Amino acid sequence: MKVYTIRDIARLAGVSVTTVSRVLNHRPDVNPETRIRVEKIIQENHFVGNTNARGLKQNNEVIAVVVRGRSNPFLSNLAEAILNRASSLDDIFITEYIDEKDDEFQTALRLSFQNAVKGIIFVGSLIDDRVRAIRSLDIPVVFTTVNAKSANLARASSVAIDDRAMGYQVASELLSLGHRRVAVFGADPVAGDSLAMRFQGFCDAFADHGLTYRQEDYCETRFSYEAGYQAARTFFSEHPDVTALFSMSDTVAVGAMRALKDLGLSVPEDISVIGFDGIDISRYTVPRLTTLEQPVNEIAMRSVDLLLDMIDSNAEPRHILVEGIYHRRESVAPPSPASRT
């Protein structure tokens, strides 16, 4: 029996691999007629989808893409860009979307037991002690969006921006405008991931300006619109002297901007807001969101090519840094003299 891949389904439906991925992951941004057509072809060809690959024969080697953060649009876009890059290749790629609180390394182990996995791409991973779980897997892996030098894995490469430098840049921009009390919405600030590095860079900029960042202005949150909304409603109700917000995700920033509006506060007149990632919606918010863009297509291309070099040519692991792009838009301004007093 023929094993159908996501590329086969896309070809039969006359759509892109990205569209099939969106249907498989129940994304809302798919035309209803297109969704019906794709789902019909999936059913007719007994395609089980990328979330599990039980339909794949064990002698078919696959490349697994593990996405940690199913509600994060940036990571979903990055995963789709990886599949687009893969669509021109002969290799079979399977994807697994998990919650941001789930364990991506245990997921990788499970996938390797279910399939003949010859390589793994981790999207949105967290480098910590859990990484020891995959040290027994003698296959190359690539971490996207996080520098994996600290992972201490013999066959691990990575593609990421310089998160510490980007966090420094964001803080420097706000400090140069006169902001001194700045809220930061992120994940665990002491974890070994890209978000923790952004916060370290942010604090470095404060120190270089002779200031100490106030830890009580840091808010740990999940990465969704609703989480950003709820965090901002609570935080800014309790911190009237804060004049700016650095959100480590555009998704959280958009939710926070809605909360600020509901609190009767204006962006940027009362609160300046800077996001991170550069997702499409940042160009259409009111006001348009200032953000630091991660180059999705470049990260995806380099991640796939790097993994294939390690698989096909036994290339040495590499850790590649790509340039982030700062977009100053309408959501940032100097603090008003009467702001938040």
Image (spheres, helix red, strand yellow):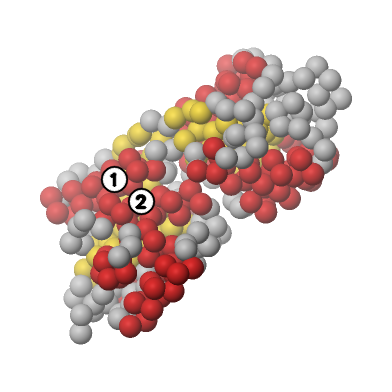
Mark 1 highlights which residue? 301
State the image quarter where residue 268 is shown. Answer: top right
Closest to the observer: 327 or 163?
327
| Residue 88 spot, x, y in % from top left | 21, 56
What residue sits 38% from the left and 72% below the top? 38
Q: How many numbered marks are there?
A: 2
What residue sits 77% from the left and 20% below the top? 336
Tell me if I can see residue 117 in this picture.
Answer: no
| Residue 6 spot, x, y in % from top left | 30, 67
Mark 2 highlights which residue? 81
Which mark sits nearer the N-terminus, 2 or 1?
Answer: 2
| Secondary structure of residue under mark 2 | helix
Horizontal side of 289 relative to 41 (left or right) equals right
What residue sits 44% from the left and 30% below the top? 325
Closest to the observer: 46 or 167?
46
| Residue 319 spot, x, y in % from top left | 31, 39
Horizontal side of 294 relative to 286 (left or right) equals left
Tell me if I can see residue 272 in this picture.
Answer: yes
Q: What amino acid is found at the position of numbered circle 2 in the picture?
A: Ala
Q: What amino acid is found at the position of numbered circle 1 in the picture?
A: Met
